[in-house]
Image (cartoon, helix red, strand yellow):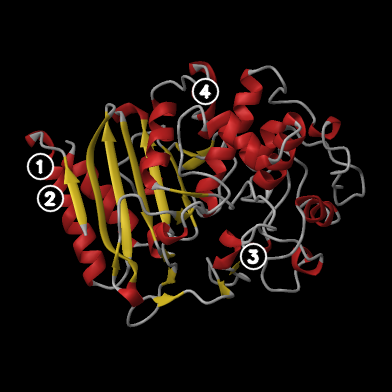
């Protein structure tokens, strides 16, 4: 275990409060290991690695540990798309068909659908995920669509062909639904840049910010943490193939952790990246600080503006969706101390993060335990502790 806390006595109480949450969560066997980082007004005021990266070998968690990012990939890939918008290579309301003519899903009526870049970024394109279907007899499962977390053996092009074969759930722009839209976005970025998605994200986002540990590849295998799944009496090590429902009554995510080492696995824009908490905090701070050198400030403001109006977000009460992440609208409905306008999302391997622009606050909490680290009590207690500590 390692810890590095801000020497400023202003944040001593913050450190103690976060330490207490981490220690209790580890002692309760709800998490195996975590890296937590907090920045206030541009300064990292808390940074700690705690618990174990590999419980079976007693390997401690380290600050530079690599994590399978799952949906933490989404804001990174969304930023890459917005860099292209800033460069004038595509508009938010452009029909993606002109760049992806082979991806032409249809409405339930049989009519071809028009999908815009904005609808992909906001998850209002009419798409979904197979893991959200009630069982393995749903249309995505029957069509063999990959959610990007398994070793499907498919190319991205073939996966999108299968995705397009399933009628859209609703007319684009009329509802919200968490979805494979960011995988489609990845294909769009690749087409716009005439490069692989991996190379495009590197050129557009990670290289300009020197995010050397964030990519679609595992560059240092011994730093990649072992994933776990919550169980009784303690989390169990994730199996080679592990299907774990996120919500009761759903088919569940098909996890195949070895996908991270599979050079032939397609680059999933929605869930395929690897990275560190430090790299991701740096990206968040760049965005919170106005976006330079990646994006102009007005486009960052657009990212953090609710694009979905009054459309309800399933499982996200009190929030709307911006361009790549949720945005808090009603703190009471969300039962959170966060300020209105706070950005938030997570990752199924066990991650949560949020940015509160009003408080100049950025928080990253990566763990190796699904789903406690994404949506468990740990995320609530950590958030509460941070706001008590910065008052």
Residue 297 pos. (x, y %): 48, 17
Of pointers 3 and 4, the one earlier in the residue sequence: 3
Q: CA distance from mark 3 to mark 4?
A: 31 Å
> Which quadrant holds residue 389?
top left
Q: Is residue 247 left or right of residue 289?
A: right
Q: CA distance from mark 3 to mark 1?
A: 43 Å
Task: Specify few, some or many for label 1: CA neighbours under 10 Å numbering under 14, 14-19, or 20 or more.
Answer: some
Q: Which one is closest to the eye, mark 1 or mark 4?
A: 4
Residue 277 pos. (x, y %): 38, 46
Element under disc 3 = loop
Residue 295 vertical placement versus 182 (above, below): above
**Is there a contact, CB below 8 Å, between mark 2 and mark 4?**
no
Q: CA distance from mark 2 to mark 4?
A: 35 Å
Of pointers 2 and 4, the one earlier in the residue sequence: 2
Task: Kindly identify the residue that appears in the image at 58 percent across and 52 percent down.
Answer: 271
Looking at the rendered structure, which numbered label has been put on residue 150?
3
Element under disc 1 = helix
Identify the residue position indicated by label 1 in the image. Answer: 12
Residue 326 pos. (x, y %): 50, 41
């Amino acid at each position: 275990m390692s810890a590095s806390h801000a020497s400023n006595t202003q944040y001593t109480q913050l450190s103690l409060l976060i330490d207490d949450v981490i220690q209790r969560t580890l002692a309760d066997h709800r998490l195996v290991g975590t890296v937590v980082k907090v920045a206030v007004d541009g300064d990292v005021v808390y940074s700690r690695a705690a618990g174990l990266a590999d419980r079976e070998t007693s390997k401690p968690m380290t600050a530079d540990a690599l994590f399978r990012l799952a949906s933490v990939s989404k804001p990174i890939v969304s930023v890459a798309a917005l860099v292209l918008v800033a460069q004038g290579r595509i508009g938010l309301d452009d029909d993606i068909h002109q760049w992806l003519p082979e991806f032409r899903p249809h409405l339930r009526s049989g009519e071809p659908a028009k999908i815009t870049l904005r609808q992909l970024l906001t998850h209002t394109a009419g798409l979904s995920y197979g893991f959200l279907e009630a069982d393995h007899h749903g249309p995505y499962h029957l069509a063999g669509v990959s959610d990007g977390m398994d070793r499907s053996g498919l190319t991205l092009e073939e996966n999108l062909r299968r995705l397009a074969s399933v009628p859209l759930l609703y007319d684009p722009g009329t509802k919200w639904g968490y979805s494979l839209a960011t995988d489609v976005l990845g294909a769009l970025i690749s087409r716009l840049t005439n490069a692989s998605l991996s190379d495009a994200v590197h050129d557009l986002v990670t290289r300009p910010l020197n995010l050397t540990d964030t990519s679609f590849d595992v560059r240092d295998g011994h730093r990649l943490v072992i994933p776990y799944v919550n169980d009784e009496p303690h989390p169990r090590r994730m199996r080679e193939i592990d299907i774990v429902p996120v919500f009761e009554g759903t088919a569940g995510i098909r996890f195949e952790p070895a996908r991270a080492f599979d050079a032939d696995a397609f680059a999933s824009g929605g869930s395929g990246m690897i990275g560190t908490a430090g790299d991701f905090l740096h990206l968040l701070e760049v965005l919170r600080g106005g976006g330079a050198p990646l994006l102009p400030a007005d486009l960052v403001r657009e990212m953090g503006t609710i694009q979905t109006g009054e459309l309800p977000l399933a499982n996200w009460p009190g929030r709307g969706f911006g361009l790549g992440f949720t945005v808090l609208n009603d703190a009471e409905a969300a039962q959170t101390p966060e300020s209105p306008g706070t950005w938030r999302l997570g990752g199924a391997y066990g991650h949560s993060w949020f940015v509160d622009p009003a408080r100049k606050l950025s928080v990253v909490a990566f763990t190796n335990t699904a789903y406690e680290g994404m949506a468990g009590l740990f995320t609530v207690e950590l958030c509460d502790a941070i706001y008590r500590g910065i008052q």
